[in-house]
């Protein structure tokens, strides 16, 4: 393949992932100054010619400051646009601000997913590549092409390699049933259970019931993200209470904010397996119950196919 016209730049949100992707593609990282002025404003300068190039920027808009990583992405895009890049693809493995994707009845709240989409477009991005959006319908907030790829093949491959016995796949809520059912189908058509929960306020969950028989089973919880891990730990507790012999959670995005690490360490959860769309904190790395898989090979293959105008969907249909 010819990658002569590909240029890959990285923000500061996840340089380790960027390095893995660049290594997979066997290309050289684009030269740029990406830092801050003394007052904290993003400072960016492109240090090489990108005129006519197919440019990819790797920058998840994650914490510890999602506002900062989002703004840094926008400033990098603007610098590349003004440097006459032919096409700019924002590779945003974790798309921050996506949890508020609709306005619930009788609430005065923003739709931040739409706002973030508009900001990225206004900066001059031609295409978005992301992983496991919080809700698939967020794709409709963009007026530019968006490739929302799935980490499930990576997660399922790990599950199958572990040869868990008496597996039952668990959806942590009713909204995640489609995701969990798809995983169960790939895991030798495993049984499915659902946790019925109520959320009176953000990051506050009261778990009500488990729909399905988990007695004596290995429960595999499938979710898109883990934030404070409060929901996850409550889920593990009720599953063990209902007789589960083991509870392992697989989630694409490890936000792990607040007391997440201590919550996990003091819970009934046997293991949390996640991907590197978001870098783990030092505390998370040291936690024996957290294990990370790499999404870099998948992202590298998708970047290659975007650049060469090849099908992306076949990566995932062929993996079924």
Image (tube, grey):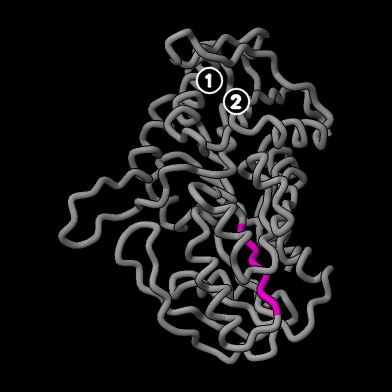
- Read off the residue under disc 1: 76
In the image, the segment drawn in magenta is 246-251
With respect to residue 266, does 196 lie above or below?
Answer: below
Please rate how many residues cluster around mark 1, counting C-alpha atoms within 10 Å: few if below 14, some from 14 to 19, many from 20: many
Q: Quadrant of the N terminus?
A: top right
- Read off the residue under disc 2: 11
In reply to whether residue 249 is colored magenta, the answer given is yes
Magenta stretch: helix, strand or loop mostly: strand
**Where residue 122 sits in the image (x, y, percent)?**
38, 27
Disc 2, disc 1: CB below 8 Å?
yes
Q: Residue at x 64, y 26 (%)?
A: 10
**Where residue 63 sits in the image (x, y, percent)?**
51, 37
Q: Residue at x 36, y 73 (%)?
A: 198
| Mark 2 vs mark 1, CA separation in Å | 8 Å
- Judging depth in this view, the residue of 251 and 126 nearest the camera is 251
- SS class, disc 2: loop
Q: Is residue 32 left or right of residue 98?
A: right
Q: Is residue 113 left or right of residue 15?
A: left
Q: Is residue 52 left or right of residue 144?
A: right
Q: Splitting the image into 4 quarters, where does residue 150 fall?
A: bottom right
């Amino acid at each position: 393949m010819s990658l002569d016209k590909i240029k890959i730049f990285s923000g500061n949100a996840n340089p380790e992932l960027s390095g893995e992707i660049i290594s997979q593609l066997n290309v050289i990282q684009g030269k740029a100054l990406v830092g801050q002025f003394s007052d904290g404003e993003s400072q960016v300068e492109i240090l090489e010619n990108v005129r006519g190039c197919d440019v990819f920027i790797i920058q998840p808009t994650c914490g510890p400051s999602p506002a900062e990583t989002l703004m840094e992405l926008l400033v990098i895009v603007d610098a590349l646009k003004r440097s006459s890049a032919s096409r700019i693809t924002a590779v945003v493995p974790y798309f921050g601000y996506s949890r508020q994707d609709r306005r619930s009845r009788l609430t005065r709240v923003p739709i931040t997913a739409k706002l973030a989409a508009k900001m990225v477009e206004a900066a001059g991005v031609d295409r978005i590549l992301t992983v496991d959006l919080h809700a698939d319908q967020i794709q409709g907030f963009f007026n530019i092409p968006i490739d929302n790829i799935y980490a499930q093949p990576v997660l399922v491959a790990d599950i199958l390699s572990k040869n868990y016995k008496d597996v039952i796949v668990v959806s942590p809520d009713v909204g995640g049933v489609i995701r969990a059912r798809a995983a169960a189908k790939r895991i030798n058509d495993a049984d499915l259970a659902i946790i019925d929960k109520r959320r009176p306020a953000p990051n506050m969950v009261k778990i009500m019931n488990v729909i399905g028989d988990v007695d004596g089973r290995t429960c595999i919880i499938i979710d898109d993200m883990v934030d404070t891990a409060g929901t996850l730990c409550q889920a593990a507790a009720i599953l063990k209470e209902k007789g589960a012999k083991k509870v392992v959670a697989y989630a694409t995005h490890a936000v792990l904010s607040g007391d997440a690490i201590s919550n996990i360490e003091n819970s009934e959860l046997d293991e949390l397996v996640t991907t590197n769309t978001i870098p783990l904190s030092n505390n998370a790395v040291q936690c024996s119950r957290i294990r990370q898989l790499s999404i870099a090979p998948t992202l590298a293959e998708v970047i290659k196919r975007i650049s060469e105008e090849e099908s992306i969907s076949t990566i995932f249909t062929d993996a079924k």
